[in-house]
Amino acid sequence: MKRVHYLSLSLLVILADALTKWAVAASIDLHEAIPVIPNLFQLVHVRNSGAAFGIGANTDSQIVPLLLNAGALAVFFVVVVYAFRAAVTDRVLQVGLHLILGGAIGNLIDRFRFGYVVDFLDFSLRDHHWPAFNVADSAICVGIVLLFLDMRRKPAAATDPA
């Protein structure tokens, strides 16, 4: 029963991701940019058919989308198995895993439906520009940070050199 809270977090990420992508697609023209904080943050509407940060988006290969979907499905299954094998009381680990799960599902749904994901959060600082991203990407990144913090706070298992 306690896992329902964590699964609800994944569902919340999926819903927030879908709603924000829908709102952007419905209200911002493709490739349009709306400045929010000049020279720092803008809302954009771009379609990313590649991996994170547009890697592989400009290839004409039919295999790239298949590899992206296969990779996302593999991550989905690994995270689900690991989440259900880990102690439900390990909150940092569970929250991290379920943020990754929600983000992966959010982007996977779009890749299967449309062949791309909508990215819309666009940050830059002087000459440095970060590739546009979305709520699912943010959840995945925060989840990875939480997994890293969880690993850092737990002592490494002692290995027997014999």
Image (spheres, rainbow, N blue to C red):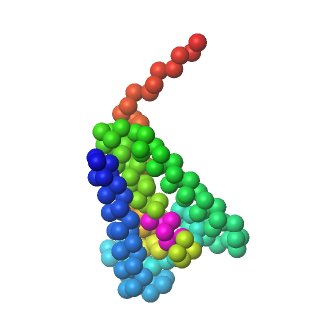
Looking at the picture, tell me which residue is in the foreground, 159 or 70: 70
Looking at the picture, tell me which residue is in the foreground, 47 or 12: 12
Task: Reply yes or no: does residue 112 show up in magenta.
Answer: no
Taking the image as shown, residue 148 lies to the left or right of residue 9, namely right
Tell me where residue 37 appears, x and y as whole percent.
Answer: 32, 73
Q: Which residues are magenta?
A: 106-111
- The answer to whether residue 149 is visible is no
Residue at image location 43% in from the left, 60% down from the top: 103
Tell me where residue 104 appears, x and y as whole percent.
Answer: 47, 60
The answer to whether 85 is drawn above or below residue 6 in the figure is above
Tell me where residue 6 appears, x and y as whole percent.
Answer: 32, 52
Residue at image location 30% in from the left, 39% down from the top: 89
Residue at image location 55% in from the left, 58% down from the top: 73
Taking the image as shown, residue 48 lies to the left or right of residue 121, namely right
Q: Which of the 4 quarters of the picture holds residue 32? A: bottom left
- The answer to whether residue 59 is visible is yes
Quadrant showing the C terminus: top right
The secondary structure making up most of the magenta span is: helix
Looking at the picture, tell me which residue is in the foreground, 51 or 65: 65
Tell me where residue 39 appears, x and y as whole percent.
Answer: 38, 72
Residue at image location 41% in from the left, 36% down from the top: 151
